[in-house]
Amino acid sequence: MIRHLFYKEWIKTRWAFFASLAVGAAVIFYIFTMAENRMTMLGAKGYMLSVLYDNPPKIYYSWLQYIPLLGAVCIGVAQYVPEIRNRRIRLTMHLPVDNRKLIASMALFGLMLVTILNALLFGFFEYENHALFPAEITGPVTATVINWFLASYLAYNYIGMTAMEPNGYRKLIYAVTGLILLSLYYNSVDFHGANSGSTWFLAIIALLSCPLVLFSTHRLNKGDR
């Protein structure tokens, strides 16, 4: 039953996944194409110095900032919105399987898809980054972009929680709360390695948000308004 559920979720989300992957790969390719062009114009040494010592430093990877978030939003919307808009979730809840297990499996599939997308994009970014820049730059840059990838998990979980919530007022509260928490992941980058000290804290927030969809689904299943 769970295997069939995973297949159903894949049918819903496959185009969102591939589109997000294509856009993310294109943005990363653009980032490093522009960096190589600047190196050609300024010279490798001059460009490296601007990246390291300009005030503020050259944040050449800023286009990556919202790409993991965009991917998670696309996957979450493709997965949950049709369930609510077309009331498919009611049919799913009448399957001969515990509802919590069903919804947990749906959420697990979505998180797995977000993780695969993040792994591919992060791996591509790191490969290009290490090929072009020395460790003095790549280490702090990696510490910065990790928070942007963590934000995608929080966004996905709040989309699921908000979509499954039967009460419109609560939906609004959840959406506002999610946006406030997301802002913690997107503080201004004034230097490479910015906000790296808060990575563990942000990772814990993202982890704790994983079961939230079960709370909204429990309310929906009870018929709460």
Image (cartoon, rainbow, N blue to C red):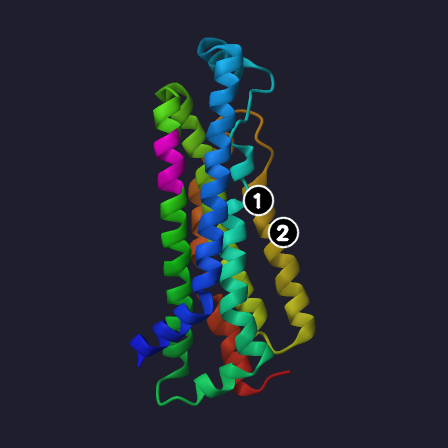
User: Is 161 on the left or on the right of 100, as rendered?
Assistant: right
Residue at horizontal 50 percent and vertical 53 percent from the top: 71
User: Looking at the image, can residue 209 be seen?
Assistant: no
Q: Are marks 2 and 1 in contact (CB under 8 Å)?
A: yes
Residue 184's mark?
1
Q: Is 137 colored magenta in this rendering?
A: no
User: Which one is in front, 14 or 181?
Assistant: 14
User: Which one is in front, 83 or 30?
Assistant: 30
User: Is 149 on the left or on the right of 119, as rendered?
Assistant: right
- Amino acid type assigned to the residue bearing label 1 in the image: Leu
The x and y percentages for residue 192 are 49, 26
The x and y percentages for residue 7 are 35, 73
Residue 62, placed above or below residue 212: above
Which quadrant of the figure contains the C terminus?
bottom right
Residue at horizontal 57 percent and vertical 44 percent from the top: 184
Question: Which quarter of the picture shows residue 63?
Answer: top right
Residue designated by label 2: 180
| Mark 1 neighbour class, 10 Å CA radius: few under 14, some 14 to 19, many 20 or more | some
Q: What stretch is highlighted in magenta?
A: 122-128
User: Is 186 on the left or on the right of 176, as rendered?
Assistant: left
- Amino acid type assigned to the residue bearing label 2 in the image: Ile
Q: Distance between the residues labelled 2 and 1?
A: 7 Å
The x and y percentages for residue 145 are 46, 37
